[in-house]
Image (cartoon, rainbow, N blue to C red):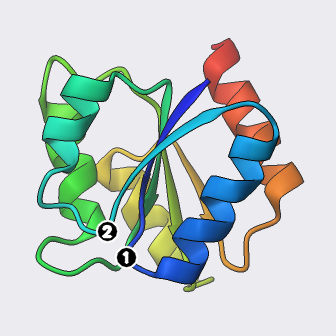
């Protein structure tokens, strides 16, 4: 599976990348949303893991852009955020994210969500 990770925090991005790479998956990453639609088009990931708080453009705006583009509309997007409020989850889903996971990440749970989205 190819995963596009859009996360500005080096530590979080590195942990996600290492966890999935060790399990045989390919990970492409970006530190901000400035190039994410372009990366999603060129890399054709199976899934996108998207931080909600990013510099330059928010994760909510990125989700909307991804879902508005015909080339990226069908790629599942999982929002990740440190905010555990129900309003944050609802906003992410309303923006077009297909799933939501709060930090710190439970990687087994995240993988279950990915597998479920990819099986649809």
Residues marked 1 and 2 touching at CB (< 8 Å): yes
How much space separates mark 1 and mark 2, taking CA atoms? 4 Å
Q: Position of residue 93 (x, y in %)?
A: 43, 52
The relative height of residue 16 versus residue 55 in the rendered view (above or below) is above
Residue identifier under label 1: 8
Q: Specify the quadrant that holds the N terminus.
A: top right
Outermost top residue: 120
Say which label, 1 or 2, has the lower sequence index. 1
Indicate the position of residue 69 as horizontal and vertical percent values.
12, 28
Q: Would you call the spot at circle 2 few (<14 residues within 10 Å), some (14-19), or many (20 or more)?
A: some
From this view, report whether residue 94 is shown above or below residue 56: above
**Mark number for residue 31?**
2
Mark 1 residue element: loop
In-front residue for pair 90/76? 76
Report the front residue among 112 and 2. 2
- Residue at x 14% of width, y 71% of height: 57
Q: Residue at x 31, y 68 (%)?
A: 31
In the picture, the quarter occupied by the C terminus is top right
Direction from residue 44 to residue 45 in the image, left or right: right
């Amino acid at each position: 599976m190819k995963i596009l990770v859009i996360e500005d925090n080096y530590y979080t991005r590195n942990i996600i990348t290492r966890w999935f790479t060790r399990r045989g998956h390919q990970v492409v990453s970006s530190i901000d949303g400035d190039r994410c639609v372009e990366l999603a088009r060129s890399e054709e990931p199976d899934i996108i893991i998207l931080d909600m708080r990013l510099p330059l453009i928010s994760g909510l705006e990125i989700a909307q852009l991804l879902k508005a583009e015909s080339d990226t509309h069908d790629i599942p997007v999982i929002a990740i955020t440190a905010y555990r409020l129900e309003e944050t989850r609802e906003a992410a889903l309303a923006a077009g994210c297909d799933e939501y996971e709060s930090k710190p990440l439970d990687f087994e749970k995240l993988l279950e969500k990915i597998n479920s989205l990819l099986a649809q």
